[in-house]
Image: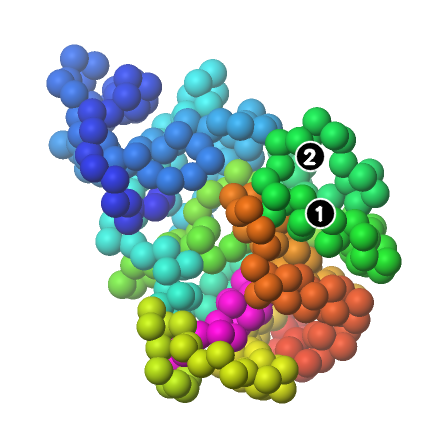
Amino acid sequence: MVTNATAAAQTAPEWVRKALADAGLVSPSAPGLDAVRLAGRNETYRVQTPAGSYVAKRLQGPAATARFARSTGHAELGSGPLTPQLVHHDADALVLLFTTITDAISGSDLLVQESFSTRQCADLGSAVGQLHNAPLAAVAQLPTPSLSMPSDEALRALPLDLVSRFTAGEVQAWRLIQSDPQLPGYIRALRASSDDAQHTPIHGDLRVDQVLATSDALHIVDWEEFGSGDPARDTGSWIGEWIYRAILDIPTARGDGRGSQTGSVLERTDFTERDVIARGVAKLDAQAPFISAFWDSYRTQRTVEHDEIARVTAFAGWHMLDRLLAHAHSRPSLPGLHRAAAGIGKRILSNPVGAAEALGLMTPTTTVGAA
């Protein structure tokens, strides 16, 4: 679990101490333990005990019971080498207790710092491919993973009581999606094709911040959406993360050494439209080796047909819009760069096969069972 927190230590809450005691890691009468609160939608603490360091998570929010069932279901299947060990769980309290992955760096930090290696991406691709090859029967009894894509009703209109709680940025984001003459149709088509696809076990929420890196391994965390689903959801969202990063990097000097900079943001203001397009292409070219390393390694584990590849890129396109909505949740307005990302997402959704070819995903590669 995540270990790089910056909050000050505090006394561990009673539910954390109880979980540790129930797991036999501390005495029920042990004095207070220091804990650090970690960020996220759940109530999560890292705590140090005489037996070692652990992360305690109490699930909260929508569908917490289903997310708990999926998390424990994944652990009961053996978790895998890239997953922190679940050492205790309490179904009544919705509490999970994991071993801590020490000295770990979040994948999102690696991406921003340009510290991801192609080897790490290849390792992740192989691990995800193995996950998607696991028997579907193993997840048959788990709650179906939720899909973040909006419903038909939401694509047409949202309830007034919900909109009244939106930030101005969220209102702008939904208006951008709902008022587009074509975008809702593209989203409906992707959801329908994904529903009809052959399902496999999936992570269900594979993003760079769900990956932790240590000096010798990568670890995939937060299996709250684990279950049966379209494998293109996982691969598409991962590839979408790299495309999204390339778009966000258009106005920055990260890695290209062009112009003076302050905090990595270029001080130049004379970019033409041609400059912006050229920089976008260059930024995506810079990410291409990492996308290819993940994808080529993934395809050594399982055969991927062309219709699935099209869904992979379509989900990568949807990821731009998903990030738009997530960014808007805490913003009074939508920056132009995020609007641009949404526009690129729409273009990918409109022609996923063409996007797959442009990204090199259609390139033949060795697959399991291939001659």
Label ID, residue 150: none
Callout 2 crowding tier (Cα within 10 Å): few <14, some 14–19, many ≥20: some
Q: Is residue 170 positioned above or below 130 on the image?
A: above
Q: What residue type is disc 2 on?
A: Val
Q: Residues within 10 Å of mark 1 (few under 14, many from 20)?
A: many
Instruction: Name which of mark 1 and mark 2 comes first in the sequence.
Output: 2
Q: Residue 249, relative to residue 196: is it above or below?
A: below
In the picture, residue 291 is in which quadrant?
Answer: bottom right
The answer to which of 263 and 224 lies nearer the viewer is 263
Is residue 71 depicted above or below 203 in this figure? Answer: above
The residue pinned by badge 2 equals 163
Residue drawn at x 32%, y 19% is: 15
Please, what secondary structure does the residue beneath circle 2 have? helix
Colour mapping = rainbow
Callout 1 touching callout 2 (CB < 8 Å) = yes
Q: Main secondary structure of the magenta part?
A: helix
Horizontal side, residue 83 vs residue 234: left or right: left
Q: Is residue 220 left or right of residue 12?
A: right
Circle 1: element type? helix
| Residue placed most toward the observer, 106 or 229 | 106
Identify the mark at residue 174; answer none if there is no mark.
1
The magenta stretch spans residue 245: yes
Quarter of the figure with residue 354: bottom right
Residue drawn at x 64%, y 62% is 339
| Quadrant (top left/top right/bottom left/bottom right) for the C terminus | bottom right
Image quarter hosting the N terminus: top left
Q: Position of residue 204 (x, y in %)?
A: 59, 47
- Is residue 236 in the magenta section? no
Give the CA separation, mark 1 to mark 2: 10 Å
Q: Residue at x 68, y 68 (%)?
A: 344
Please provide the residue range marked out in magenta: 238-255
Count of labels in the image: 2
